[in-house]
Amino acid sequence: MPNNTQVYKIVAADIARDREQILALWSCGLSQGGMPSAKFDWYYIRNPAGIPRAFFLYQSDTNKPVGVAAVSVREMLKNKEIILGGELIDFVTLIEHRTLFPALYLQREIRRRIFEHTPSIELLYGLPNTKSTSVVQRVGYQRVGQMVRRVRMLRSAGYLTRYAPAWLSRLVGPMVDHARLAVMAIRAISSRRRQSKWQNRPDSRFDELWERVAAQSNQIDGLIGVRDSAFLTWRFVECPLKSYEFFTLVSTNDNRLLAYAACAVESETLHVHDFLVDPADRTGFKALWVALSREAFHRGHSNISVECLGSASMQRDLQSVGMLKRQQRPLYASARVGKPTLPQEQHWYITCADEDG
């Protein structure tokens, strides 16, 4: 296939008008949790930060698009002000166009058009798969850090079968698990000024927690997505792809929200898709993970997991409570020309909440 831009062209999509064309292209390679229509209506139509910008890839001599990609909008706090970031999402082409040049051309044009014609968006970011990494690098994105997936094993019988007979693992596993649970219980004794609770949706206390976190974030050159109750309600409560619950730690003195974790069950694992801790509570971070691990065990889960990008101290704290590193994937970003440079890795705060579900 000729390797020049005359073969292809980019056309901005109209989200409402072009819904069916976008869904048709998604069916060529994006599962969207088995619910593409529901994902479209939720993430594209009802996004509180704004409707995503979508772009079609056309072969110049055809009237039907051969690919599509979009940029979602994310409100973020940076340097004491709210800015808009854009996440690269939902990129797919017809199978006969899955070569380097169409992908490179589409992503380059999206970056150029967003920065030239959407001045409200100050930076773009994405989590490309291995095959797409070379494309985003050539377009001009920088690797700013690693999204690290961490797992804490709560039930050890399955793991022990690698080293011992199944009958022995079934016998010894529960003893190991309850011993580890006892250690967690001892740690929890010092946290009696906190009470844990599950709830189905955020309330006004989540806004108060976000305000405290935002005030602390203003003291550094940090970047964190807005996590107020409106965003959390849309991102988790209204999400059609998964069912979420909020595990919370509240103060026993005044019922103030000290920390939360937005959780979904995935097979035998309780996966934490987002979490936030009051920065004034010095032991609150570890208390959240200890309490959540105990709760996950009592609910019958075999593991607890989380994926996040954050400071080295946060990663060390996760490691110290038994959340062990399993995999990682790079986050790439690009800032608008003339805007401040991208923050260093230790000043980013990214979780699965900052992705598109």
Image: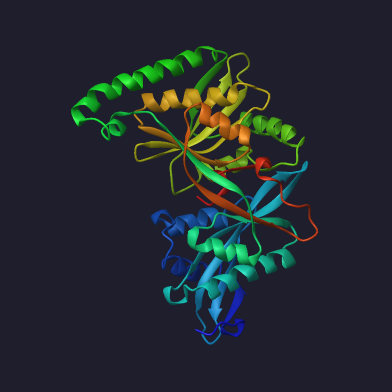
Q: Is residue 269 left or right of residue 168?
A: right
Instruction: Identify whether 217 is placed above or below 133.
Output: above
Using the image as rendered, state which of residue 85 and residue 173 is in the foreground: 173
Asked whether residue 13 is in view, the answer is no
Q: Looking at the rendering, which quadrant does residue 161 occupy?
A: top left
Residue 268 is situated, as x and y percent measured from the top left of the image, at 34, 37
How was the colour assigned to the protein in this rendering? Answer: rainbow
Identify which residue is drawn at 56% across, 29% down: 317
Identify which residue is drawn at 50% across, 21% down: 196
Residue 37 is situated, as x and y percent measured from the top left of the image, at 45, 59
Identify which residue is drawn at 60% across, 67% down: 107
Numbered marks: total:
0
Asked whether residue 177 is in view, the answer is yes
| Residue at the farthest front position | 163
Residue 211 is situated, as x and y percent measured from the top left of the image, at 70, 33
Identify which residue is drawn at 35% across, 40% down: 267
Q: Looking at the rendering, which quadrant does residue 347 occupy?
A: top right
Instruction: Identify whether 50 is placed above or below 148.
Output: below
Instruction: Identify whether 164 is placed above or below 54.
Output: above
Residue 168 is situated, as x and y percent measured from the top left of the image, at 21, 25
Q: Looking at the rendering, which quadrant does residue 102 occupy?
A: bottom right
| Residue at the farthest right position | 338
